[in-house]
Image (cartoon, rainbow, N blue to C red):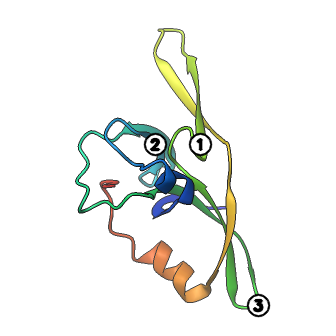
Amino acid sequence: MELFSRTAYCEKCAKEKLPDNGTLFAVIQGTGKQVVVLKVESIRRRRTPVGFTPHFVSLLKVKNGEAIVAMQCGVIGCGSVIETEYDQLGNPTYDVGTIEARRAIMTIEDWNSLVLNFRDTGYEI
C-alpha cells in the first residue's frame, strides 16, 4: 500500500480555522517515504484557505472503475498525533499515529491525477 501526502479539505480544521501560524503537521517527505513533522511558520491567508491541510493518502482498493482511498488529516491534534521517543543521545524521534481517518471514493482518472500530476514539492500550505 503506497502512502503519500497531498493537500485536501478537512472540515474539522476549517471549524478550528486551521492551518495557522504555529500549527504542527506531519507529511511524507520525498521518495524515501519518511514521515516528518513540520510547523507552519508564515501562512498567507489569501493563498491558503482555512481547512486545506496536508493529508496522508493511500489507495485501499479499486472496484468498478473507482478508487477507494483512505485519507487522514496530517494536522497534529486533528487526524494525527505525535508520539515522541528519544534515542540514546537524547534526540527526539517521532512516530505519527492516527486519531481519525476517512474513506473517499474517486474515479480512477482523479486518482491518477492525484498521484501523477503532483507539483507541491515544498509542502506549501
The residues bearing labels 1 and 3 have C-alpha atoms spaced at a distance of 31 Å
Q: Are marks 1 and 2 in contact (CB under 8 Å)?
A: yes
Residue at (30, 54) in percent of width and height: 122
> Does 82 appear above or below 50?
above
Mark 1, mark 3: which one is toward the viewer? 1
- Sequence-wise first label, 1 or 2: 2
Residue placed furthest toward the top: 89
Q: Is residue 62 left or right of residue 120?
A: right
- Residue to which mark 1 is pinned: 80
Question: Percent x, y for residue 125?
Answer: 33, 55
Q: CA distance from mark 1 to mark 2?
A: 8 Å
Residue 37 or residue 35, whichever sits in front: 37
Measure the alpha-carbon separation of dots 2 and 3: 34 Å
Q: Residue at x 52, y 39 (%)?
A: 76
In the shown orientation, is residue 70 left or right of residue 38?
A: right
Query: Which residue is found at the position 23% from the left and 62% from the top?
Result: 46
Residue 37: image quadrant is top left
Residue 120 x, y percent position in the rendering? 33, 63
Q: Which residue is painted at 34% across and 61% down in the image?
A: 49
In front: 45, or 54? 45
Residue lying at the far front in this picture: please name it.
Answer: 15
The three-letter amino acid code for the residue at tag 3 is Asn
Q: Is residue 25 left or right of residue 21?
A: right
**Is residue 3 among the parts visible in the rendering?**
no
Closer to viewer: mark 2 or mark 3: 2
x then y, percent, for residue 114: 48, 75
Q: Could you classify mark 2 by the number of other residues whose Cα lies within 10 Å: few (under 14), some (14-19), or many (20 or more)?
A: many
Which residue was labeled with disc 3?
A: 64
Amino acid carrying label 1: it is: Ser
Name the mark on residue 25: 2
